[in-house]
């Protein structure tokens, strides 16, 4: 019998391939019911779905031209990558951008630009651009804060981003002298590596949450007392990706670590409502802002994506009547961002940044309130020319999210919502996170910020100014339409930015509220 089996020839290797494909065909035709293509074209039908799955990568690398892709095209991504790696980020043979395209930005250079004198802070530190305003100064907060950098990391939560990504960003902002917004996922251990922190919370109140899901002032006070790295507090009213929409954090994703940071139960679904429980109208919001500021001593601000203006006008009227109000306002663009969202929200709900910010700024400008508020812009502003436009429109700082992610390795795979991010940035997979070299990536984020600020300052000096806060609406022009192709920002958006008090960069450097001094 053994001789019989020994004499049976072994099948050639390729028969196993045919057997496997035969079994796949049986599965496609008789068992699976979900895909018509696989049923009608067994085996080869799988090729269609595989090609579809790698379509974005194929288009990104082989099909789309340099200026075609969204949300960030190849030229924009390449500039960030080169800047972060301290490589050559120049382009040769002139611009390949259509200079007559709709909304193309032109910054007016002066005949003779600003010359940095000897002894000036920028002579020694060409990347030093602190905020021209102090958060909390008008409202006499006990711990005012002047951001030491006009470009900072926007709200991105631990849980949405990986531990390695958050840690790399925090170490990077420390090296760059910037601040790091926690996002609404709470303050994690990965945020505590030396960078200044803006603690951000939304409707889930993660990190400052009661058992029934409401806001806890006691937890807020304790959090601030135990973490002097927190320099300001931001209340999220809405975000550009999905304004007015809540969310559910599935229990399966809540690890013991996440549960401790967010103040929720392990393994239990957590609802983030569409609206806040701690307040239901503008008057109650104002009361909460003052209560948090009084209890913690920190500047308190709000973040929102802009749509209807009636409640913003009500807020401005109350500020005018009481002399109180938020210390800063972050305006998020409706373009969406790192937060996963339904296309109906990301594509259609709330205004893009330029329209939203210009509408909101006029509300406070018309009431002479702009000097009380530090305005922060957030929405694809992480490039020097776009930053110049934003400052000309009235912002005092910008926050960057996706640009910061790209500086530490994001390739715009657009799978942030699937937990399969190939670069380990937007995933909780330990295996994928292991690809992030934290010291290296922190250096790259810091270098991106330094390169950004250096070029931004060079543009500022070319326009004849010492600091970006001095930009006016007439310093920047934008292509509007074929009938009147090119207009100044003032003409396009219907207002002139209020003058920001500015006496010199040296005074900003000597300010006792600068960065993490206090």
Image (cartoon, rainbow, N blue to C red):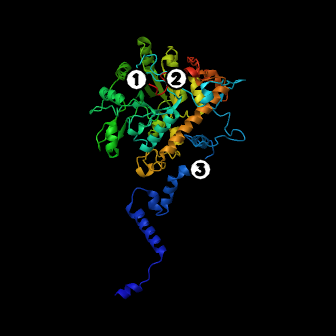
Q: CA distance from mark 2 to mark 1?
A: 28 Å
**SS class of the residue under badge 2?**
helix
- CB contact under 8 Å: marks 1 and 3: no
Mark with earlier residue (2, 3): 3
Q: Is residue 151 visible?
A: yes
Q: CA distance from mark 1 to mark 3?
A: 47 Å
**SS class of the residue under badge 3?**
helix
Mark with earlier residue (1, 3): 3
**SS class of the residue under badge 1?**
loop
Which is closer to the viewer, label 1 or label 3? 1
Q: Percent x, y for residue 357?
A: 52, 25
Q: Is residue 192 left or right of residue 105?
A: left
**Quadrant in the picture for the N terminus:** bottom left
**Quadrant in the picture for the C terminus:** top left
- CB contact under 8 Å: marks 2 and 1: no
Question: What is the quadrant of residue 108 in the picture?
Answer: top right
Q: Which of the two residues, 409 or 172, is positioned nearer the viewer here?
A: 172
* Residue at the (36%, 28%) spot, across then down: 224
Residue 298 circle label: 1
> Residue lying furthest top in this view?
321
Which is closer to the viewer, label 2 or label 1? 1
Q: Percent x, y for residue 20?
A: 44, 68
Which is closer to the viewer, label 2 or label 3? 3
Q: Is residue 480 visible?
A: no
- The residue under label 2 is 359
- The residue under label 3 is 61
């Amino acid at each position: 019998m053994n001789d019989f089996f020994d004499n049976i020839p072994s099948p050639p290797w390729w028969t196993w391939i045919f057997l496997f494909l035969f079994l796949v065909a049986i599965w496609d035709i008789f068992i699976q019911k979900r895909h018509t293509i696989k049923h009608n074209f067994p085996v080869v039908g799988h090729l269609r779905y595989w090609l579809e799955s790698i379509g974005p990568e194929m288009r990104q690398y082989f099909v789309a031209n340099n200026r075609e892709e969204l949300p960030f095209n190849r030229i924009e991504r390449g500039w960030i990558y080169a800047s972060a790696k301290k490589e050559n980020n120049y382009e040769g043979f002139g611009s390949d951008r259509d200079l007559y395209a709709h909304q193309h930005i032109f910054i007016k250079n002066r005949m003779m630009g600003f010359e940095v004198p000897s002894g000036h802070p920028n002579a020694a530190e060409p990347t030093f651009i602190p905020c021209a305003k102090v958060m909390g100064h008008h409202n006499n907060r006990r711990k005012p804060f002047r951001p030491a950098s006009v470009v900072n990391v926007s709200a991105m939560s631990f849980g949405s981003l990986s531990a390695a990504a958050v840690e790399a960003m925090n170490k990077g902002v420390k090296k760059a002298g910037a601040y790091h917004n926690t996002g609404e996922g709470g303050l994690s251990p990965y945020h505590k590596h030396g960078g200044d922190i803006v603690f951000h919370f939304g409707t889930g109140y993660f990190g400052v949450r009661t058992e029934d899901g409401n806001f806890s002032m006691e937890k807020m006070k304790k959090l601030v007392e135990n973490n002097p790295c927190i320099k300001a507090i931001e209340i999220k009213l809405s975000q550009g990706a999905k304004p007015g929409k809540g969310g559910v954090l599935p229990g399966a994703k809540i690890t013991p670590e996440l549960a401790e940071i967010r103040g929720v139960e392990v393994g239990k679904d957590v609802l983030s409502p569409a609206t806040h429980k701690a307040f239901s109208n503008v008057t109650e919001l104002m009361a909460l802002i003052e209560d948090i500021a009084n209890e913690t001593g920190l500047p308190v601000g709000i973040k929102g994506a802009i749509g209807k203006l009636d409640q913003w006008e009500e807020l401005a009227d109350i500020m005018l009547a009481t002399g109180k109000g938020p210390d800063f306002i972050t305006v998020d663009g409706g373009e969406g961002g790192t937060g996963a969202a339904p296309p109906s929200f990301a594509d259609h709900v709330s205004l893009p940044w330029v329209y939203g910010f210009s509408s909101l700024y006029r509300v406070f400008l018309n009431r002479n309130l702009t000097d009380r508020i530090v305005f922060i812009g957030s929405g694809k502003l992480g490039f020097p020319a776009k930053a110049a436009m934003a400052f000309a429109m009235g912002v005092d700082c910008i926050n960057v999210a996706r640009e910061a992610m790209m500086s530490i390795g994001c390739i715009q795979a657009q799978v942030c919502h699937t937990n399969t991010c190939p670069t380990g940035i937007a995933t909780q997979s330990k295996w994928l996170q292991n690809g992030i070299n934290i010291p290296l990536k922190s250096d790259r984020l810091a270098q991106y910020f330094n390169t950004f600020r250096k070029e931004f300052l060079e543009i500022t000096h070319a326009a004849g100014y010492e600091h970006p806060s001095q930009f006016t609406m007439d310093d920047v022009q934008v292509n509007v339409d074929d009938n009147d192709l090119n207009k100044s920002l003032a003409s396009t958006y219907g207002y002139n930015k209020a003058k920001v008090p500015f006496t010199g960069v040296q005074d900003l450097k000597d300010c006792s509220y600068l960065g993490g001094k206090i």
